[in-house]
Image: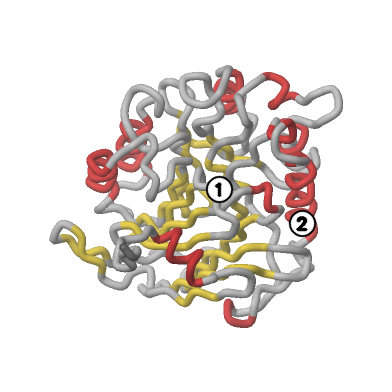
Amino acid sequence: MGENINKNISRRQFIKAAGLTAGTTLMGCDICKAKNYKGKTRSFSTNTDFDVTFYAVADTHFGRHQIAGDNELKNKQAIDKMNYIPGNLSYPASAGGGLVDVPRGLIMPGDLTDFGTTSEWNGFSVFDGFKDNYCGNGTGRLNCPVYEGFGNHDFAALHGTSDYVREQVKIRNLTSARPGISNISSNGYHYSFNWDTLHLVNLNLQPTGPGHAENSIEFLESDLQTNVGDTARAVILYFHSDFDREDFWDEADEDVFYDIIEDYNVIAIFYGHAHVGSLVPGQWKGINIYNVGLTGTGKFAVAHITNSTMVVAECVSNTTWGVVSIKSITA
C-alpha cells in the first residue's frame, strides 16, 4: 500500500522539505497583528523607543569532540565571527541594511556541554572547555557578555553524568559574573535582566515546575508581576526545550506557561534542543519563536530590535547571511 502523503508534519519537517536554507528571507506577519488563542487576542508592540542588538546560540555541547568531530573548532569559528561582524557586516537589504552594531550580549538556551562534567566546563588536556570560550565577559575569546542557561545535557538527572555545569550557572548568578542581572530565583538558577527597557528572562531547561526545570515557572510568574506588571514593556524569554518534540514537557505544561504570559508583551521566545541546521523562525500561540540551531554548524543568530522592526538573522560567515526573519512592530 502506498504512503499516506496527507499525514501531519511538524514545522521543522515542513521547513526542511521546503528547502529554507541560506539566503531565505521570511517576511512574517506583524508582531502585533491580532492573534487569537483561547478566545484572547494578542496585539502587542515594543511600546518604547530602543535599539538593541544581541546574539543567540544553543547546543554548544562542549565535550562532543569525543564522538562527533571537532565541535570545539566550530564553536571557536562561530565566536570569531561574532567578534568580527560588528561594524563590518551589513544586514541584507531586505532587512533594512546598515551595519551590525556591537551586541549587548549573547543569550544561550542550554546544552552548553555534552555531559555536564568538570572537564567540559573547565577544559580538557588538549581541548578547551565552555568557560575558556564563553565566560570572559568580553575579556576571553568572545568580546561580549554571555547569558547562558542549562539544558538536558548539563545535569545528571537527564542526559548528563554530572551536575557540575548546571551548578556553574547558579554560581555565575550568585557571584555577579554576568553584568546587569536584576533578579535571581530563590534557588539561584533562573534570572532576568534588562537591556534598556527590553526585559529578558532565562528559564534554563523549560518553563515548568519542580523537578528537572527547578521551578522556573514560579520564577517567571513572579518576575513578570514584579518587573513588568502593566507597563507593556517588551519581553523576551529563552529556554532550552523544543516546542515540537516536547521531550520534557507536554501540552498541559505549555498551556500553564501560556496562561502566565498571555497578558504580557512577549515579543519573542528563543530556544534550542532540536539541533536544527539553520535558524527556524515560527509562531506559537501567536508569539514569535526562534529555534536558533546547533552551534556545531558554525552559525549563530543575530537579533536587532527597534521600536518598528524585529530582525532575527542567521550569520553564516563574515560576509554572508542565511535565513532572515523580519517582523514589523506597530504601535
Report which quarter residue 221 is drawn in.
top left
Q: Which residue is mark 2?
A: 81
Residue at the extreme left of the image, as rendered:
39
**Residue 307 rendering spot, x and y as whole percentages:** 47, 69
Report which quarter residue 131 is drawn in.
top right
Q: Is residue 162 left or right of residue 211?
A: right
Residue 331, placed above or below residue 186? below
Q: Which residue sits at x=52%, y=26%?
A: 159
Q: Which residue sits at x=54%, y=51%?
A: 195
Look at label 1 and name its amino acid: His
- Seen from the viewer's position, the closer of residues 216 and 6 is 6
Q: What's the mark number on residue 205?
A: none
Look at label 2 and name its amino acid: Lys
Mark 2 or mark 1, earlier in chain:
2
Report which quarter residue 234 is drawn in.
bottom left
Q: Which residue sits at x=43%, y=47%?
A: 237
Residue at the extreme front of the image, as rendered:
1
Q: Which residue sits at x=79%, y=24%?
A: 124
Instruction: Calculate the distance from the C-alpha at mark 2 to the C-alpha at mark 1.
Output: 20 Å
- Seen from the viewer's position, the closer of residues 5 and 177 is 5
Q: What's the mark number on residue 275?
A: 1
- Count of marks overlaid on the render: 2
Residue 38, placed above or below residue 261? below
- For numbered disc 1, what is the local secondary structure? loop
Q: Nearer the viewer, mark 2 or mark 1?
A: 1
**Residue 297 rendering spot, x and y as whole percentages:** 68, 53
User: Callout 2 environment at 10 Å: few (<14), some (14 to 19), or many (20+)?
Assistant: many
- For numbered disc 2, what is the local secondary structure? helix
